[in-house]
Image (cartoon, rainbow, N blue to C red):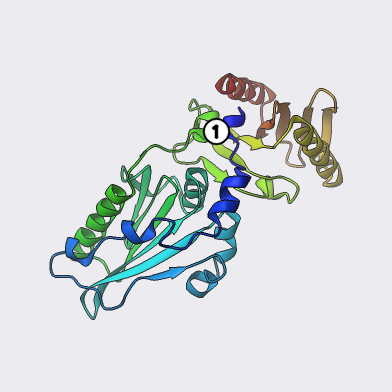
Amino acid sequence: MKKYLPVLTALLTAAGFMSGEESGLTVIMPDAGVLSGWHLEEPAQTYSPETLYEAIDGEATLYHEYGFVAMMTQSYYLNEDTAVTVNLYDMGSPENAFGIYTRYRFPGYEFEKIGAEAMVAEYGIKFCQGRYFADISSWGTGSVYDRAVYTLAGELSAAIGGSTEIPGIANLLPAAGRTDKSLNYTAVHSLNQAFLKSGIEADYVFGDDSGKGMVLFFESNTEAHEALNRLAEFYHAAAGSVLRFEQDGGVLMIRGKDDKYSEFNVLDTTIIGAAGFGSVENIGQLLESIRETQE
């Protein structure tokens, strides 16, 4: 289990001081020659953790939560009115790159196999691969833009190299019953709780019942138990009915004000959970499936 812990404190601390060149962004960003007839009008710009707000002021905090290391941006021009911009982010680890990617992903979008996974929209492509997250956006729509965006995405993926698989933490939640493309990785404040750290969660549907399954990560079994205690306190204060709380056994079951049930169990250095279901039986089934993926 511990090999999947996305905390990676030492790695992220070391990566946080890399420049764009040191993190590999310079050699990954495609040359304008890959697009016939297109050109560059200005050199690529690189942003550090201290300057990222200059490029994406409204979202910089989100990227910092996911271990942002460096970002390089480059625009490619066919003419003064036709251009495509590439924002390439070094997020420090495959888990963080996948996590920031999932913040933009929704099941109803179109997806393709570029890198680990690519989300395709009318005005561009977003994909993650290894420790990198790429956001390629066009200034307009049509076949000229489509060819340029896809060409740049392919060139970026080839230059990044390495694994094109989604990080292994995604395998910690079972596929049976899971809504496709609903799995997300949160780097901090899982379940919108400041005392919780990183975790993965996904939507599940069993017949006419639905809810979420999750795995929350901690650095020790003791820390996981402490977090479960605080979850019990939170639900009690929120006027939910705590139906069962075994502090030593690491079990918490609650019924919300909407009469939906949730259960959380401490398992080694994690908390596994099934939340928001109308059926207690479905909760038990999902938790057992999550346990089996940990073995």
* Left or right: where 31 falls relative to 56: left
Q: Position of residue 93 (x, y in %)?
A: 50, 46
Check the image and name the residue furthest to the left: 37
**Figure quadrant of the N terminus:** top right
Residue for badge 1:
204
Check the image and name the residue furthest to the bottom: 80
Tell me if residue 186 can be seen: no
Look at the picture and state if 217 lies above or below 102: above
What residue do we see at 50% from left, 59% from top?
18
Q: Where is residue 275 in the image (x, y as percent from the top left)?
A: 67, 35
Q: Position of residue 89 (x, y in %)?
A: 44, 58
**Figure quadrant of the C terminus:** top right
* Quarter occupied by residue 292: top right
Report the amino acid beneath label 1: Tyr
Look at the picture and state if 85 lies above or below 12: below
Residue nearest the viewer, comparing 21 with 47: 21
* Left or right: where 151 falls relative to 8: left
